[in-house]
Amino acid sequence: MNASTPTTVAGERTPDGGCRTIDATALKADLVRRRLLAAAGAAAVVAGFAGRRARAAPAAATVHTVRIDAFAFQPPVVTVDLGDTIRWRNDDPVPHTVTAKGGFDSGAIAAGGTWSYTATQRGRFAYICSFHPTMKGTLIVR
Ligand SMILES: [Cu+2]
């Protein structure tokens, strides 16, 4: 057995006795495979981060509308999440207010006007219209 004879795998030998072409192709294929795996891994990591961020972040703030109609708040009780915005829309032909003692106060909301409040404090807030105290509403911020 001649120790100087290069060992090659069947099918790799080229007409001139070399064997580099197939090796290079194999190396290239391996490199491509590695890159694909790396890309897939990176994509999985990005997806993981995105998923984690989506779970950790608070839900997008919602805008809730309360109509003021026929001297009544509709709906009379509204439950929102902290950070949500509540928008009162006065559909009556006279001004009203949204007034919570020790909480928020819209001042006069003109006929056809709106007033918005972003819930920054958790709790249950009973409110009235200061012009027509029989008009009652409740805002629950959870
Ligand atoms: Cu009123």
Image (spheres, grey):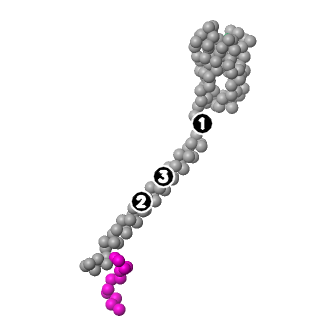
Placement of 31 over or under 119, stated as above or below: below
User: In front: 104, or 126?
Assistant: 126
Q: Is residue 30 left or right of residue 136?
A: left
Tell me the number on the disc at residue 59: 1
Residue drawn at x 37%, y 68% as measured from the top left:
27
> How far apart are labels 2 and 1 at the CA level?
36 Å
The amino acid type, in three-letter code, at marker 3 is Ala
Q: Which residues are magenta?
A: 1-12
Give the image quarter of residue 98. Answer: top right
User: In front: 17, or 95?
Assistant: 17
Residue that numbered label 2 is attached to: 35
Which of marks 3 and 2 precedes in the sequence? 2
The amino acid type, in three-letter code, at marker 2 is Arg
> How far apart are labels 2 and 3 at the CA level?
12 Å
Quarter of the image containing the C terminus?
top right
Q: Secondary structure at mark 1?
A: loop
Q: What secondary structure is the magenta-colored segment mainly?
A: loop
Magenta stretch: includes residue 102? no
Q: Is residue 141 left or right of residue 11?
A: right
Q: Mark 1 and mark 2 in contact (Cβ < 8 Å)?
A: no
Q: Residues within 10 Å of mark 2 (few under 14, many from 20)?
A: few
Q: Residue furthest left?
A: 16
Residue drawn at x 69%, y 11% as measured from the top left:
71
- Numbered disc total: 3
Quarter of the image containing the N terminus?
bottom left
Q: Mark 3 and mark 1 in contact (Cβ < 8 Å)?
A: no
